[in-house]
Image (cartoon, helix red, strand yellow):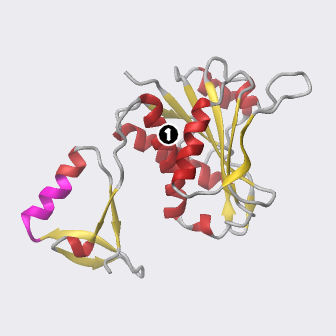
Amino acid sequence: MTDKYIQDPGHGGTDPGACAKGNIEKNYTLEAATYVNKRLATHGITSDMTRTSDITLDETPRVNKVKSSGAKQCLSHHFNAGGGEGMELIHSIYSDGKFEKLIADEFKNAGFPLRPRTIFTRKGSNGQDYYYMHRRTGAVSTTIIEYEFVDGDNAEKIKSKSYREGMYECVVRAICKQENVTHKPLISIKKSQLNVDKIPEKSSNTYRLAKFVDTQSLELINNLKKEGYQILEVPSE
């Protein structure tokens, strides 16, 4: 049996988080947490969320949700600000950083940039954890993920949903390794690989799978879905 996880989308509601160049942190953090939560479910890993919509979640109700979740590990999803580029991970002064190392390795292997100081802790003046998500979440070990800088060198790149989801999938792979669960990659299928009718979606240049005209293509998709894969549709060449 795998351990339980809880996803914490940082900020929300009246607290937008960091905003710059058209990037709004609270939107990305909810997207990240939702993505990881759903992908863990396809791997049989139990996961929950502190918020599932754009609501204001203050400090005490946020940490109470984490503490009462029964989870072993919390991932607090964030995007950074202040210039620069790359992902960083912050763990409690009482944690060993091994889980964070798994995440960092997946980002590196996937070609995403890392901050020079990728993994670190931070103490307050009282010698305790500086961040309340470490200090107040009880027995739940919390990792703060800062995916990228909304105002940094990759501010335009992170406007791409596929780029953001590539980062989120690194977190999924790391959790699978932590739990000794075989990772099920997302399958990309080009329309040209399937014998289907192609129907444009509004003004976009992408297409959706509509009416299958051969049973072999339909059987392929259904079998992949039964195995827990998510089908990522991409435009034909």
User: In the rendered image, which quarter contains the N terminus?
Assistant: top left
Residue 50 in the image: state x and y as whole percent. 57, 35
* Numbered disc total: 1
Residue 42 in the image: state x and y as whole percent. 34, 40
Instruction: Answer left or right for 91 relative to 164.
Output: right
As rendered, which of 100 and 213 lies closer to the eye? 100
152 versus 66 height, above or below? below
141 versus 195 height, above or below? above
Instruction: Answer left or right for 77 relative to 222.
Output: right
Q: Is 220 contained in the magenta span?
A: yes
Q: Is 37 contained in the magenta span?
A: no
Residue 115 in the image: state x and y as whole percent. 71, 51
As rendered, which of 93 and 129 lies closer to the eye? 93
Extreme residue in the top direction: 139
Extreme residue in the right direction: 125
Dot 1 alpha-carbon crowd within 10 angstroms: few under 14, some 14 to 19, many 20 or more: many
Disc 1 designates what residue?
174
**In the image, what residue occupies the spot 53% across and 62% down?**
163
The reply to whether residue 15 is in sight is no
Name the magenta segment's main secondary structure.
Answer: helix
Instruction: Give the quarter of the image for residue 210.
Output: bottom left
**In the image, what residue occupies the spot 33% across and 65% down?**
233
177 versus 208 height, above or below? above
**In the image, what residue occupies the spot 77% across and 60% down?**
84
Residue 48 in the image: state x and y as whole percent. 49, 33
User: In the rendered image, which quarter contains the C terminus?
Assistant: bottom left
Extreme residue in the left direction: 215
Instruction: Answer left or right for 222 relative to 63.
Output: left
Range of residues picked out in magenta: 213-222
Q: Amino acid at mark 1?
A: Ala
The reply to whether residue 129 is in sight is yes
Label 1 sits on a secondary structure element that is helix
